[in-house]
Image: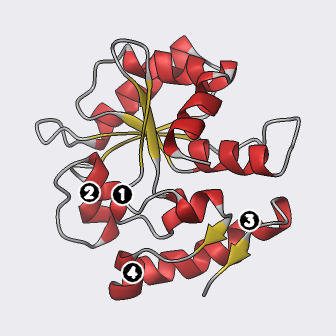
Amino acid sequence: MKKEDIEQLISQDEYMVKCLRTVRKLNLPDCWISAGFVRAKVWDHLHQFSKRTETDDVDVIYYDPDHVTESFEKQIEQKLHTACPDVPWSVKNQARMHTLNGTDPYESSLDAVSQYPETATAVMVRMTNAGAIELAAPHGISDLVNCVIKPTPMAKEHPSVQSAYNHRVKHKKWDKRWPQVRVER
């Protein structure tokens, strides 16, 4: 499975396209949907699940150093809930997330995603203005398409991210939901 195959897979999913189109209409800078939104779709496909695995939330990320308040994020979340009330939206400005994560400031959404705890989750997707699906994965897609959960370089180097990785592995139970998943410690 290549990057283009994942983009095609997403483009054929009515729910995902609806989410991406709704987010695109907000015109937020450097805006994507990341993490489990993409990971679950790929793993569902690889496991030949006929029904989409529900995720706790749909992680909308953007990078805007001019509006770094949580209240601004909540306003965006409210707009999304109004547009699509059936979607569990979560909105985070990556220009402020380093303060919560205890890391150096991020330079972009891609930089922030590169520092997620696990490589298979460090993926993001958006719909371009032309309507094309665009996938970005700072650590590549190999772990994602091979159903491997392993720490990102940041999780190996930074104690708080390593702690988050260990917590997520313990509580998310990806290998129970998707039997082909292999977890590396």
Give the residue displayed 36% in from the left and 57% down from the top: 138
Of labels 1 and 2, earlier in sequence is 2
Q: Which residue is mark 3?
A: 174
Q: Position of residue 113 (x, y in %)?
A: 37, 56
19 vs 43, nearest the viewer: 43
Point 33% across, 68% down: residue:
101
Give how far apart the Cα atoms at labels 1 and 2 are. 8 Å
The residue that disc 2 covers is 111
Q: Secondary structure at mark 2?
A: helix
The three-letter code of the residue at mark 1 reads Pro
Residue 144 position within the rendered picture, expressed as x and y whole percent measured from the top left: 59, 59
Q: Considering the numbered disc 1 on the image, is that residue within a helix, a strand or a loop? A: loop
Q: Earlier in the sequence, mark 2 or mark 3?
A: 2
Amino acid type indicated by mark 2 = Asp
Mark drawn on residue 138? 1
Amino acid type of the residue that numbered disc 4 sits on in the rendered structure: Ser
Quarter occupied by residue 19: top right
Q: Are marks 1 and 2 in contact (CB under 8 Å)?
A: yes
Q: Check residue 160 in the rendering and tell me which mark sits there, or answer none.
A: 4
Q: Amino acid at mark 3?
A: Trp
